Amino acid sequence: MIKINHRLLTAILPGILIAMASCGNAHAQLTCNTTWAQGLQFGTVDMNGNSVATSSANLGFSCNNGSTPTPALFCFSIGQDPTRTGYNPRYMPILHGSVSGYYVGYTLYADAARTQVVGSLAAGGNAPPLKIGLTVPAYTTTQNIPIYGEIKPTSQNSYMGGQNYGHTIPVTLSYMAYTGAIPTCESPQMKTLSTTMYVGASLSNTCRIESASDMSFGSVDGILNHNVDSTSAITVTCSQNTAYKIGLNNGLNASGTTRRMRGTTGYIPYELYQNSSRSTRWGNDSSSGVETAGIGMPQTLTVYGRVRPQTMPGGGNYQDTIVVTVTY
């Protein structure tokens, strides 16, 4: 009976050894029981500016190890918004009860230089997870891993200014201890933990006047028996979907609401209009200003001027100054 048992033992042992070898390079001592993700807040962002908004936060985990330091691989997969997918950029939706369909694009990076885009195992090679290889100390360890965010205002046209944006996205930590060759994040031996991460931003309503060109009516004879027309251009940049109004005051030499250019011998009345037919006066109050909405890029509006038939007061140069006001 002893010899039979010995033979059975020698027959079974090689099979056991082969089964153990097929398990690869996993190390059984490491167990992580907690993972977390700090909220990443961009604060107030001016989408009308040329500067990039940045922020950062920490991803973390707590693990129990054996009595010997152990090499381990940790992979953070950060999901995308379910209503508008993407990793570079990602999209956070508007937080408004009665408005939907507006988003702000942002990107998450693994490095402070913001060159390594962080994605998810689900994204494949285009946006891989955040991958960290380290030697886990003996017994209990806690680690914080920085992650970096960026909002680039350029080429974004799906947002509305003056609103808050944000969402909560899933975060999955995959991990395993190993011996020998470094495994990949896709290894089937990876254990997983899950948490969530909040990303938010507040967009300001902003506008700026880029330029306002001069309007010249040219040279006019002493008796003017026909209309003399001219135009000028006002260029304004306002954040996407920001409502704004452009008003033109009556100038420095107005008589009542009649605009006038002043010269050395008198005044020449003229008027400014919103349309090319010169039928709608362009003023500076609630009913006579021009209203539109920003597109996040420069918008140019034409001002139509006209000097009507009249007797000129005398030779010389005549001019006026108009103040352009943008209200938003």
Image (cartoon, helix red, strand yellow):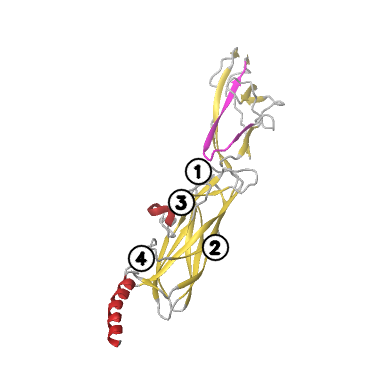
Q: Is residue 271 above or below residue 115?
A: above
Residue 299 visible (yes or no): yes
Main secondary structure along the magenta-highlighted residues: strand
What whole-number distance in Å separates the C-alpha atoms at marks 4 and 2? 27 Å
- Closer to the chain start, of discs 2 and 1, is 2
Q: Which mark is residue 303?
A: none
What whole-number distance in Å separates the C-alpha atoms at marks 4 and 1? 39 Å
Q: Amino acid at mark 1?
A: Gln
- Closer to the chain start, of discs 4 and 1, is 1
- Closer to the chain start, of discs 1 and 3, is 3
* Quadrant placement of the C terminus: top right
- Closer to the chain start, of discs 4 and 2, is 2
Which residue is at a point 39% across and 60% down the rendered structure image? 186
Q: What residue is pinned by disc 3? A: 87
Kind of element beneath mark 2: loop
Q: Amino acid at mark 2?
A: Gln
What whole-number distance in Å separates the C-alpha atoms at marks 4 and 3? 24 Å
Which residue is at a point 60% across and 40% down the rendered structure image? 242
Q: What residue is pinned by disc 1? A: 156
Q: What residue is pinned by disc 4? A: 183
As for residue 302 lying within the magenta part, the answer is yes
Q: What residue is pinned by disc 2? A: 38
Residue sitting nearer the eye, 289 or 224:
289
Q: Is residue 294 above or below residue 74?
A: above
User: Where residue 297 sits: x, y (%)?
Assistant: 51, 39
Residue sitting nearer the eye, 210 or 49:
49
Asked if marks 4 and 2 touch (Cβ < 8 Å), the reply is no
Residue sitting nearer the eye, 102 or 302:
102
